[in-house]
Amino acid sequence: MHAEHSKHDKHIVGYGTYILIWLGLLALTSITVSIAGIHLGNYTLLVALFIAAVKSGLVINYFMHIKFEEPIFKVFLLISGTTLLIIFVLTAFDIIYR
Amino acid sequence: MADGNIAVAEKSFYQESTNRYKGILSWLLSTDHKRVGLMYLIAIASFFVIGAIFGILMRLELIAPGKTIMDAQTYNTLFTLHGVLMIFLFIIPGLPVIFGNFFLPIMIGARDVAFPRLNLLSFWIYIVGAILVVVSLLLPGGPIDTGWTFYIPYSIRTSTNVSMAIFAAFVLGFSSILTGVNFITTIHRMRAPGMTWFKMPLFVWSTYATAWIQIIATPVIGITILLVILERMFGVGIFDPALGGDPLLFQHMFWIYSHPAVYIMILPAMGVVSEIVPTFARRTIFGYKAIAISSLAIAFVGYLVWAHHMFTSGISDTARWIFSLLTFLVALPSAVKVFNWVATMYKGSIDPKPPFLWVMAFIVLFSIGGLTGLVLGSLATDVHLHDTYFVVAHFHYVMFGGTGTIFFAALFYWFPKMFGKMYSIKWANIGVALFFISFNLLYFPKFIMGYMGMPRRYFDYLPQFEPLQVVSTIGSWLMGITLIIVFGNLIYSLRNGKKAPANPWGGVTLEWHVPSPPPLENFDEIPTVTHEPYDFSQLKEMKYGEG
Amino acid sequence: MVKAETNIELNSQAHVHRDDLGARMGMWLFLFTEVLLFGGMFLVYAVYRFQYSDEFRLAAMELNTGIGALNTIILLTSSLTVAASITAIQKGNKLLSIFLLISTIIFALVFMVNKFFEWSAKISHGIYPGSPELLEKQNGEILFFGLYYVMTGLHALHVIIGVVILVFILVFVIKNKINADDHVKLENSGLYWHLVDLIWIFLFPLFYLIH
């Protein structure tokens, strides 16, 4: 586990991939803006957040490269994300049931 | 286990520096984890002493009802500062930045942490935070008087220097975060060949779990602090009930950090205990994996219990029973550790040196603290005990009797390694004994007073509490004398102590394989680890087998 | 580069080893702290939106969806350019990398200009924390704008920090300190920038798409 030249650099993400992801992000943005106009009641927020989550997934996996990193990075992300989620859920037990 | 040949008398890290400067500058700009650890030690020990003096002054005021030596405003300021100093400047950083910094790299067979310059930066950020605390005392408006918990709405309304004081805490939080980042990366990336995760010493495991809490929990108090400052400066409304702000939301945000923070305080201490017990029982630790995993479990479950600080504040009943249940759960991994430590001692060959005696004191005091935590975690009893002296006693038993005791234990365990000198065993023993007595005199009466209904943070009290208040105050004087003896022994020995051998206690973790004090780069050759961490058969092969 | 054994001499430099994966790991850990910082802020938002849902809807009508969407597109594109700048440097294409970095910085500045106009417009209409007009409104609306200013303000602060970092990185690239063989600083700066983008990906629907 000594210092080593990270051979990770060998993996280069091509311009084409990035552009595709970017186009996907733009598409999702226009979808989310158009959907906002439709009255979905309580589901509007959920859909908007879902689309934001998908966009985030693309940014995190490709732009931030985590898809191609060592698995430990994904474990870290899972730990942090899960903790944040649990904080939201536990707080909700107070706010919703007051 | 290879630990290198020493052809010539090696220089220690005191004589060799990571930079070109001489004298004090070579220390202040040093990226050597050992020097950074020692600089933290000086700063932190100083703040502990100041915080203790505030405590003694508070107890002096409380020796009799009514005004004794100060007015109510001063008293409010004192208990606020006592909390701020002890919590943000002593207990939270304490064990990780002093002993984690000094010993983590050595224990995993590394030459330094992953980011040595970031480490130095963390130290200076800590110093800036400390200076800001002092500045907040002196600015117009007067020192903060909200209690260290700065609840809204009072913290929004008071004209004292809340913003500067809590901004200091924000800065200190940054230091904590950067230390956490450094330690996690170090443990993942810099272990010596052969040191798999389950060959790491348990102090390293606890440092790892603690670092995760530092990273994930600290930002939440960061944003809370920012919001209070913005509220005071601009009236955004978020924490102002008059504008729709929710005081309970503040409490949630505050405790989402401050509860895990207590695990930042106790996990490293438990790690130290897991080092000391095997060494002085001359036996491998019982249940190594259970202790290692329980550190992670405590760190995780510690995030799930924060609202047990809010049972009487108006949260929903649903929330109350959920958090009470989760609170009971978090006691389990802690108990696992205590059982394993005791099992280690069974049929071991006990050497009752001072570090071990401190650990004995810890086990008693921390158990009392932990069990009374369950009393508070139970809804029905908490309703009566919340905001009474019972709470004050509970957290002093776990924080001071827990982490504080182990702060001393770690000092007495690793002093020979850090400074190359031995201290007086006789005076160290006297110190532990006096500590145990004065601690209980000072704090046990508070359990009783709390049960009788004495509210916390009160400047004045009804006459029926006076006898126990007097006992507690006398305990505080005895504690003052104890601290003088404890620190005095160490400070005296820095200059006059006998030269310490590399391995005075017969320990087998990697720090005992190097000279006392260690050389600049810790090891001549990075060792290849083959033994279990607490395998005492190594003593025969070790260059510095014993004493 | 295998670990070098240094000679133990007076005033020797501390053994500095290179570990790109460790550097990235440290950066990700730092990013988690930012996630929790803004996460806490989003928690506050969630609570107040739950408690004042009608007033939030009312107040949100004051915000211009168009500018919000434009800023979203700007940031998404800036993420593209900074990511591509890494590809460029990995392929040894220094000029392209510089161009893409400059583009990223320009996009960031345009974002800030938009924000400036947005805020100025609001402020000139008397909508800012503590203003008499705002205090006339209902609590839920006051909170909405409080959250709006704090969250977009904190985000904007991070954009500014990102710009400063990217400028330094640009200089390093120009001076070849960042190159095909050693570019972890650029990668880490890119990671920071993507985080800034991620935060906005969530801010946008929560403030601009409440209809």
Image (tube, grey):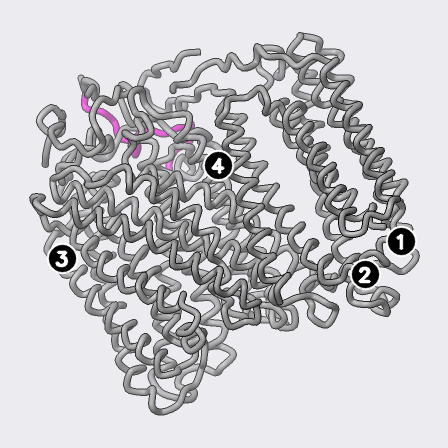
Q: Residue furthest top?
A: C92
Q: CA distance from mark 4 to mark 3?
A: 38 Å
Question: Label 4 amino acid?
Answer: Val
Label 3 vs label 2, nearer the camera = 2
Looking at this view, is B361 or A79 the one in front? Answer: A79
Q: Is residue C82 above or below residue B445?
A: above
How far is the residue under mark 2 from the one under mark 1?
Answer: 14 Å
Comes first in the chain, label 2 or label 1: 2
Where, quadrant-wise, is the N terminus of chain B in this rendering?
top left
Q: At 22% from the left edge and 22% from the top edge, which residue is drawn?
A: B530
Of helix, strand and loop, which mostly describes the magenta segment? loop
* Residue B52 visible here: no
Which chain does the numbered disc 4 sit on?
B
Mark 2 or 1, closer to the camera: 2
Question: Depth check: B144 or B263 in front?
Answer: B263
Query: Disc 4 to disc 2, how far (Cα)?
Result: 42 Å
- What percent of the width, then of the height, locates residue B286? 19, 41
Q: From mark 1 to mark 3, how far is it between C-alphas? A: 71 Å
For residue C54, the mark is 2
Q: Nearer the viewer, mark 4 or mark 1?
A: 1
Q: Which residue is mark 1?
A: C62
Q: Which residue is mark 4?
A: B181
Q: Are marks 1 and 3 in contact (CB under 8 Å)?
A: no
Find out whether residue C178 is within the magenta segment.
Answer: no
Q: Give the magenta range.
A: B8-24
Q: Amino acid at mark 2?
A: Asp
B487 lies left or right of B44? left
